[in-house]
Image: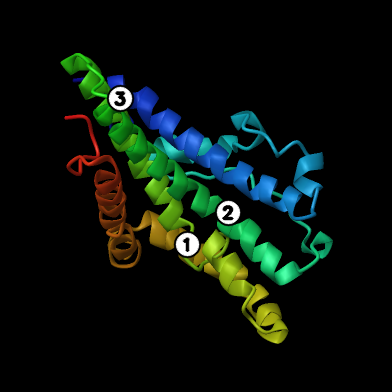
């Protein structure tokens, strides 16, 4: 089996599609929520769109292909445009990770709908669908959980920042560059990521299992994140 960047060639389209879709919807959610809450900065810059080219960073894509870790262009937000700046900034920030959680849920829901509808597929079709769904769930759960880490420049930090007193926030801003450096060390040094990010990512399976169990009760079927 031929591989490219550690991914089987026949699975590469699923790998790229899942990641690009997850990032695009994540950034769209930030931009759309800001627009609806009163800040049209992202809207005027063409970011309230599901066109991936409006959101993707070519450097982020390059890192993704090399290290399976990447990013998109940050969505511009002017909190001064919000009627309630602290609350609405937190809502805009949380919209990104929540959108990835919803995409993962929609993936599991799709499986249950196909099972309930008794859709017949060839074994090759089932294998292809299951492979895509594995990438879809993996990368959307990674984007959901990873962005909750309270380190710059991630969404988790931006949410925590809103709870800081002003003098603490100003002090923290002086050290953001070092926090970003720590963040990069955590991401790219396996022993550090195993101790720090590893436990967080271990929540992915229980969350997906919980979605499965809930939908199984609703659809009256056994829990199954795939068609097999």
Q: Which mark is drawn over residue 11?
A: 3
Q: Which residue is drawn at 56% across and 37% down?
A: 24
Instruction: Read off the residue under disc 2.
Output: 95
> Looking at the image, is 180 positioned above or below residue 160?
above
Q: In which quarter of the image is the C terminus?
A: top left
Q: Residues within 10 Å of mark 1 (few under 14, many from 20)?
A: some
Q: SS of the residue at dot 3?
A: helix
Query: Which image quarter: residue 199?
Result: bottom left
Q: Which residue is drawn at 80% across and 54% down?
A: 38
Query: Which image quarter: residue 226?
Result: top left
Q: How crowded is mark 2: few (under 14 residues within 10 Å), some or many (20 or more)?
A: many
Of the image marks 2 and 3, the number of the one nearer the N terminus:
3
Percent coordinates x, y for residue 180 in the rendering: 54, 63
Q: Nearer the viewer, residue 22 or 179?
A: 22
- In this picture, residue 218 sits left or right of residue 78: left
Q: Which of 133 and 10 is in front in this view?
A: 133
Instruction: Read off the residue under disc 1.
Output: 148
Of the image marks 1 and 2, the number of the one nearer the N terminus:
2
Q: In which quarter of the image is the N terminus?
A: top left
């Amino acid at each position: 089996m031929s591989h490219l960047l550690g991914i089987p060639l026949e699975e590469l389209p699923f790998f790229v599609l899942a990641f690009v879709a997850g990032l695009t919807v994540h950034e769209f959610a930030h931009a759309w929520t800001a627009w609806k809450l009163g800040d049209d900065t992202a809207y005027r810059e063409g970011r309230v769109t599901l066109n991936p080219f409006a959101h993707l960073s070519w450097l982020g894509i390059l890192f993704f292909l090399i290290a399976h870790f990447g990013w998109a262009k940050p969505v511009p937000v002017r909190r001064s445009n919000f009627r309630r700046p602290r609350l609405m900034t937190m809502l805009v920030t949380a919209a990104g990770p929540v959108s990835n959680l919803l995409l993962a849920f929609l993936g599991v829901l799709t499986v249950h709908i196909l099972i309930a509808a008794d859709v017949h597929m060839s074994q090759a079709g089932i294998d292809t669908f299951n492979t895509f769904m594995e990438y879809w769930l993996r990368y959307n759960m990674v984007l959901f959980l990873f962005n909750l880490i309270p380190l710059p420049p991630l969404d988790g930090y931006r949410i925590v920042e809103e709870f800081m007193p002003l003098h603490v926030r100003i002090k923290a801003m002086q050290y953001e560059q070092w926090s970003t450096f720590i963040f990069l060390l955590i991401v790219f040094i396996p022993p550090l990521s195993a101790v720090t990010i590893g436990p967080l990512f271990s929540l992915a399976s229980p969350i997906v299992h919980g979605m499965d169990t809930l939908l199984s009760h609703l659809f009256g079927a056994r829990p199954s994140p795939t068609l097999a």
